[in-house]
Amino acid sequence: MAVQGLGAVGHNVVGQLHELGARIVVTDIDPAKVNAMAAQYGVAAAAPEEIFDAECDIFCPCALGKVINDETLKRLKCKIICGCPNNQLAEERHGQLLEAQGRVYASDYITNAGGTIYDTDRLEVGEVSHERGRAKVARIYENMQRVFEIADRDKIPTYLAADRMAEKRFRQIAEVKKYKD
C-alpha cells in the first residue's frame, strides 16, 4: 500500500492499515509527518516524487487532485487507485487509460464521501452521531460495489459508471423535489 499525503485522512488510513497488518510506504511534502509515521507505525518512507514508483497493490492518494496524469500513469505499479482527494484524474481520458491498463479506479467522490456524510448529518440533525455516521459511511462500500457492477455490465470504466450512478441519483432527487413542490 502506498499512501500519498499524511494529513488527517492519510494519517487515519495509515493507522487503520497498520492495524490490518498491511505493508505500507508513505510520503508527504512535510518530512516531519513522514518521520512521525515511520516512528509510530514502522512504515517505509518515499520521497514525494518517488511514491508513484512504489511497488504496491493499492495507491492511495490523500493529498492533491490531478495526481493521475500522463506522467504518473507511466510510473504507477499498483493494481488499484483508491484515495480521497477530489478530481484525482487530471482529465477524464486518464480514467479510460486506467481501464485500458487493467487497473481498478475507485471514484473519488464515492471514496471521499465520509466527510460529506458526517457534515450533512450534522446539518440535518443538528449534531454529529458517530454511530449514525458510521452506519451511513458503511454504505460507501455498497455504492462502490454498484459502481463495479455497472462498469462490468455496461463495459465502461469505473469513473463513467460512478458518473452514471450519480446522475441517476440526481434525477431521482429532482423528481422527488418536483413532486413535493
Image (tube, helix red, strand yellow):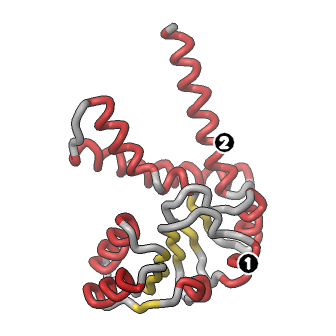
Which label's residue is closer to the chain start, 2 or 1? Answer: 1
Q: Which residue is mark 2?
A: 164
Badge 2 density bin: few <14, some 14–19, many ≥20, Cα 10 Å: some
Q: Position of residue 99 (x, y in %)?
A: 72, 66
Q: Position of residue 118 (x, y in %)?
A: 33, 44
Rendered position, 55 above or below 13: below
Rendered position, 31 above or below 100: below
Q: Which mark is residue 144?
A: none
Q: Tell me which residue sits at (30%, 75%) in the image.
A: 15
Q: State left or right for residue 65 relative to residue 29.
A: right
Location of residue 75 by image quarter: bottom right
SS under mark 2: helix
Closer to the camera: disc 2 or disc 1? Answer: 1
Rendered position, 144 above or below 25: above
Q: Tell me which residue sits at (39%, 51%) in the image.
A: 114
Q: Tell me which residue sits at (32%, 33%) in the image.
A: 123
Asked if residue 1 can be seen in this view, the reply is no
In the image, 37 versus 100, the foreground residue is 37
Q: Residue furthest top?
A: 181
In the image, 63 versus 103, the foreground residue is 63
Q: Which residue is mark 1?
A: 71
